[in-house]
Amino acid sequence: MTKTSKILGLILTVCVIFNIILLSKINSDKSNINDLNKTKVIEKIVNKIVYKEPKDIISSITMSDLNSHLKLVYSHLSTKDRKRVLLSIAKASDKYKISPVVFYGLIAVESSFRPWITHHQVVIKGKRDNGIGLGGVVPYWWLDKLRKANILETKSDLYNIENNIDAIGFILAEYKTMKLIKGTNDSTTSALRRYFGGNYKSYTEKIRNQIGSIIFSKIYE
């Protein structure tokens, strides 16, 4: 083999190696770009969920998705209690015509799915009281109405999973019938802000983030 042939052979080898490295880099970049584009698409979807509640997106999240997310993120719940939560959400959703995803996001924000929790005191018309259970329902404000609706008898019933989720639906349904809070465009967003006690955009953003978490889990599972 002549000296020239050796040089050409070396150049060819270097070119092959360079092309392999370049192709690998391109494929890696493509993967990163695809992941980035997917993330941007998801973010655009998530940004529309709570404020406009497009039915196609909300309905794409199934009870099975909620079960998977609940099991993954809120693993402190026993299998029995997880089933009770999901069954109660499904029943309340059907009863009050409110998406189960809204129930899920609200409970995640209010209590991180801890039915036993007693919340920090709130002041209502000069009286202090504690929110109770999954939805942080405040007895001072709602106990009489919930009794009349045959949802519970005493405030301690709010520690019960089924009673509390039923109470959440009752409260949201009542708020949905009221005039929209300034700056909101739909009854669900307005009801959620009333639920928290005022026109707090940060509250519905927290719920939106919880719903977004479900979507991310659903796509990347």
Image (cartoon, rainbow, N blue to C red):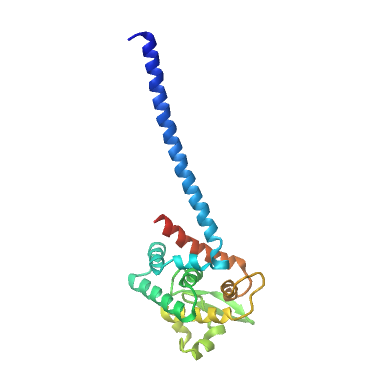
Which residue is depicted at the point 33% across and 70% down? 79
Would you place residue 196 above or below residue 69 in this image? below
Quadrant location of the C terminus in the rendered image: bottom left
Quadrant location of the N terminus in the rendered image: top left
Which residue is depicted at the point 45% across and 35% down? 25
Q: Residue furthest right?
A: 182
Q: Residue furthest bottom?
A: 148
- Where in the figure is residue 100, as x and y percent of width and height? 46, 72
179 vs 141, nearest the viewer: 179
Q: Is residue 209 left or right of residue 28?
A: right
216 vs 53, nearest the viewer: 53
Q: Is residue 197 left or right of residue 64?
A: right
- Where in the figure is residue 194, as x and y percent of width and height? 60, 75
Q: Residue furthest top?
A: 2
Which residue is depicted at the point 38% across and 22% down? 13
Disc tally is: 0
- Where in the figure is residue 213, as x and y percent of width and height? 47, 60
Displayed quadrant of residue 22: top left
- Where in the figure is residue 170, as x and y percent of width and height? 51, 82
